């Protein structure tokens, strides 16, 4: 069985408590708290990653369309899309040129 960092640190804290080394215990407890916070962040990130945001996006688009704002927003965004696409094409062309040379 593979133990994660939290489990390993918990075992080290228990071992340090058995020896009574206060400085080591304090350092390990700090590392343990950081590892637990990191794992909690990962858990929250995984929940967000697995959530289906598509219904929210569709509902938002429907509301914008009903208010007549969707077309305006798309027209305002179109020049940015075109500029971004142009930059991307230029970057790809540059990479191909560099790959052909070197």
Image (spheres, rainbow, N blue to C red):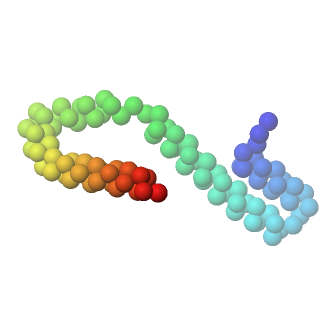
Residue appearing at x 89%, y 64% in the figure: 20
Residue 17 falls left or right of residue 57? right
Residue 46 falls left or right of residue 14? left
Q: How many marks?
A: 0
* Res. 2 visible in picture: yes
Residue 27 falls left or right of residue 14? left
Residue 22 on image: x %, y %: 83, 68
Instruction: Tell me the quadrant of the picture where the N terminus can be found.
Output: top right
Residue appearing at x 70%, y 62% in the figure: 30
- Residue 29 sits in which quadrant? bottom right
* Res. 73 visible in picture: no
Residue appearing at x 13%, y 34% in the figure: 65
- Residue 16 sits in which quadrant? bottom right
Residue appearing at x 17%, y 34% in the figure: 63
Name the outermost residue toward the bottom. 23
Name the outermost residue toward the right. 19
Nearer-the-camera pick, 13 or 80: 80
Nearer-the-camera pick, 64 or 98: 98
Residue 75 on image: x %, y %: 11, 45
Residue 17 on image: x %, y %: 86, 59
Residue 79 on image: x %, y %: 15, 51
Residue 74's place in the image compared with 102, above or below, is above
Name the outermost residue toward the front. 101
């Amino acid at each position: 069985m593979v133990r994660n960092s939290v489990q390993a640190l918990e075992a080290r804290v228990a071992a340090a408590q058995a020896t009574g080394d206060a400085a080591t215990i304090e350092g390990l407890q700090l590392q343990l708290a950081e590892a637990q916070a990191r794992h909690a962040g990962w858990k929250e990130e995984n929940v967000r990653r697995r959530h289906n945001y598509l219904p929210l996006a569709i509902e938002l688009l429907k509301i914008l369309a009903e208010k007549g704002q969707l077309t305006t927003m798309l027209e305002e965004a179109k020049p940015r899309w075109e500029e971004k696409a142009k930059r991307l094409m230029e970057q790809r062309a540059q990479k191909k040129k560099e790959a052909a040379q070197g």
